[in-house]
Image (cartoon, rainbow, N blue to C red):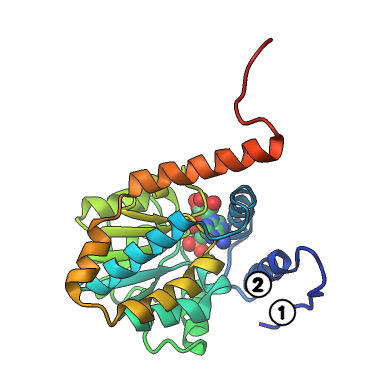
Amino acid sequence: MMLRKISPAHPRAESLRVRECLVEGFEAGLVVPEGLAAHGRGEALDYILGERTVEQAKLAMEAAVAELLFARYPVISVNGNVAALTPREVVELARAANAKLEVNLFHGSVKRERAIAGWLRRHGASEVLGVGKRFATKIPEVHSDRRKVDRGGIAMADVVLVPLEDGDRTKALKKLGKRVIAVDLNPLSRTAQAADITIVDNITRALPLMVKIAGRFSRKPREELQRVRESFDNKRNLREVVGLMRERLGKLSGVSELRYGR
Ligand code: PTJ
């Protein structure tokens, strides 16, 4: 993929660059059109958040990395958007956390699975699961193409990282006894609410930070990782993020409390 040139002087240069990655990913057959719409929803929420990584997201990232490092068999699920936006970082995180990478698509297609796996290999992945039917099994509780998982991957995992996930799989994975980590700019989504750890941040900011945290945490003793994961409260963290969004909108509107009527 060759990114079209965006002037660094443009006031929205970073946002345009990220969009361009997705458009190029779409043209290269990695991303579905629905992925472009999903990104727009994410952008709107990121705008409200102030396009920054808030403290609550950093705490969630630390808990998530501790969870991955603590896991017996961690797996990172990769869809079209994740492959287009953060291919290098997702490979680096898998390496740092000793996790498997598995392509898992909402809009299933073997052609796209192959394209995404090839793209991840070009970014340094030595093994990518979830391609084709050979090792596939099904999670009957999932009501989309995502029900197809790899026997040596998500099916066996005790911890699964599901960035930019649609709703019902998180619940199904939880029912199967797995710990689920989500990256989702929407703190109200069903995934965000059902996951054990939800990182409310843009994946483009979250993954590079998680790679750094993994480097730091890999030297920590297990008891310390255990303490980090146990001290994290997802419900409280999500409430605080919604509170931050509300506060920011209040400040921007100049109205901190709404009063109806006179
Ligand atoms: O490649 P596929 O077939 O697996 O399809 C991928 C999409 C993203 C189309 C599919 O998973 C989907 O439809 O997802 P949803 O239900 O639209 O949910 C995506 C969630 O990710 C939404 O809550 C968005 O707000 C959020 N989101 C979008 N872009 C970002 C994001 N969160 C973090 N970083 C982003 N860049």
Label 1 CB less than 8 angstroms from ligand 1: no
Question: Marks 1 and 2: CB-CB under 8 Å?
Answer: yes
**Percent x, y of residue 117:** 46, 80
* Residue 136 visible in the displayed image: no
Question: Which residue is identified by label 1?
Answer: 3
**Percent x, y of residue 188:** 46, 42
- Indicate the secondary structure of the residue bearing disc 2: helix
What kind of residue is marked 2? Cys
In this view, which residue lies farthest toward the top? 262
Q: Quadrant of the N terminus?
A: bottom right
Image point 51% across, 58% down: which residue? 201
Image point 73% across, 66% down: which residue? 16
**Percent x, y of residue 175:** 22, 50
Question: Which residue is identified by label 2?
Answer: 21
> Between 95 and 26, which is closer to the camera in this rendering?
95
249 is higher (above) or lower (below) than 171? above
* Residue 52 visible in the displayed image: yes
**Percent x, y of residue 107:** 49, 60
Left or right of 245, for residue 207: left
Image point 45% across, 64% down: which residue? 105
Left or right of 246, for residue 235: left
